[in-house]
Structures are given as C-alpha cells and as structure tokens.
Image (spheres, grey):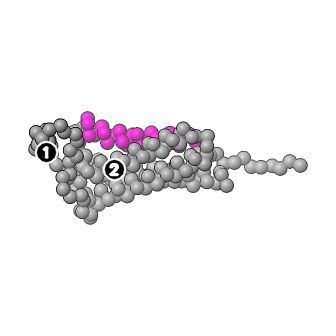
Amino acid sequence: MHLIQEPPAPPLTRGLSALLLAASVGVLGTAFLFQHAGGLEPCLLCIYERYPYGAAILLSGLALIFARRTGIVRLLVGATGAVFIASLALALYHVGVEQGIFVGPTGCQSPVGHVESLEELRDLIVNRPIVRCDKPAWIFLGLSMAAWNAVASFLLAGLAIAAAARGRKSWT
C-alpha cells in the first residue's frame, strides 16, 4: 500500500537570508557613506539606529551558514524580524523627536571618539559641530533619514516575519 504524501512546502531559502543580509549591509553602508563621503555627522539617535542593522547582519549571516537546518533558519529569520521591529520603534521615536512629539536625548549630542590628550579633546569639542537629534540633516522626498529608516525597517520586518511564519507550516 502506497501512501501519497504532498511534498512539503519549501523551507526558507538561502535567497531570503541573502536578501536580508544584503539589505542590512546596504542600509548600514548608506549611513556610513552619508557620514564619511557626504559629511553628514550623525546624531546620537542616528548612531543608535545603526545597531539593529549590525544585529541583522549577524543573524542573517548565521541563517546563510545554517541554510540546510530549516528550524534554525526559521528561528534566525524570526529573530531578524524582531530586530527590525526594534529598529522600526527606534526610527519612529527619532521621527517623533524630529517632529517635536517626543523629547530627544539631552546633553552632548556629538560622539567624541578616541582622543589622546586634553588638547585633542578641547579641539574636538570646539571645532566639531553639535548634531541635534531634532533637526534632520537630510531630507529626500519629504522624508528624513530617520523616516526612511522606518520605511526600510517596516518592510524588512514584514518580510522576515512573514517568511518565518510561512516557514512554520513546513515543519509542523
């Protein structure tokens, strides 16, 4: 007696993990490009918004490494989706600070970096402009960089979470 079984739904593929990795590297790379080639110094919240992308790079890279272990990949892709939700929350908070809805960080807004002497620190403080979180440094199509980050985070979170949830049916 032969039992006919339907083929299982395709598991999460390397393509999805590669897409999440490439998108994360692209967003983070763009931020660094704007800073180092474009001369746009990031505010404190801009710097905080970079951390989730670093975590997403790590998680999606691990998903590529473990591509044949579908349970692990689903977990990593789901965790990547959660990271993008955190990124979305942080970006929306930053947009709220820019719009005057929320109070942003107070105190020194410019990252100091590494200094070797008191004179270097003084020169850095005197010559480096204070970058405020409530003043967008760049706007494209009416959206600040923080707002574009919110759009990217929303799309990437949706993609990762939908893929992880869809993948769940493959393993039950």
> Which residue is label 1 attached to?
125
Where residue 24 sits: x, y (%)? 42, 43
Using the image as rendered, state which of residue 156 and residue 65 is in the foreground.
65
Amino acid bearing label 2: Glu
Residue at x 41%, y 51% (from the top left corner): 153
Where residue 143 sits: x, y (%)? 30, 52
Q: Is residue 104 visible?
A: yes
The C terminus sits in image quarter: bottom right
Q: In which quarter of the image is residue 128?
A: top left
Instruction: Report the residue that reaches farthest toward the bottom.
Output: 101
Rendered view: 131 above or below 103 = above
Instruction: Report the residue that reaches farthest toward the front.
Output: 117
Which SS class for mark 2? loop
Where residue 89 sits: x, y (%)? 37, 58
Residue at x 22%, y 56% (from the top left corner): 134
Where residue 119 sits: x, y (%)? 10, 39
Amino acid bearing label 1: Ile
Residue at x 28%, y 52% (from the top left corner): 45
Q: Distance between the residues labelled 2 and 1?
A: 23 Å
Using the image as rendered, state which of residue 55 and residue 100 is in the foreground.
55
Q: Earlier in the sequence, mark 2 or mark 1?
A: 2
- Judge from the rendering whether residue 129 lies leftward or rightward of residue 62; answer left or right: left
- Judge from the rendering whether residue 141 lies leftward or rightward of residue 106; answer left or right: right
> Which residue is label 2 attached to?
49
Q: Quadrant of residue 112?
A: top left
Dominant secondary structure (helix, strand or loop) of the stretch shown in magenta? helix
What is the magenta range? 13-37
Q: Can residue 127 be seen in this view?
A: no
Which SS class for mark 1? helix
Instruction: Report the residue that reaches farthest toward the right.
Output: 1
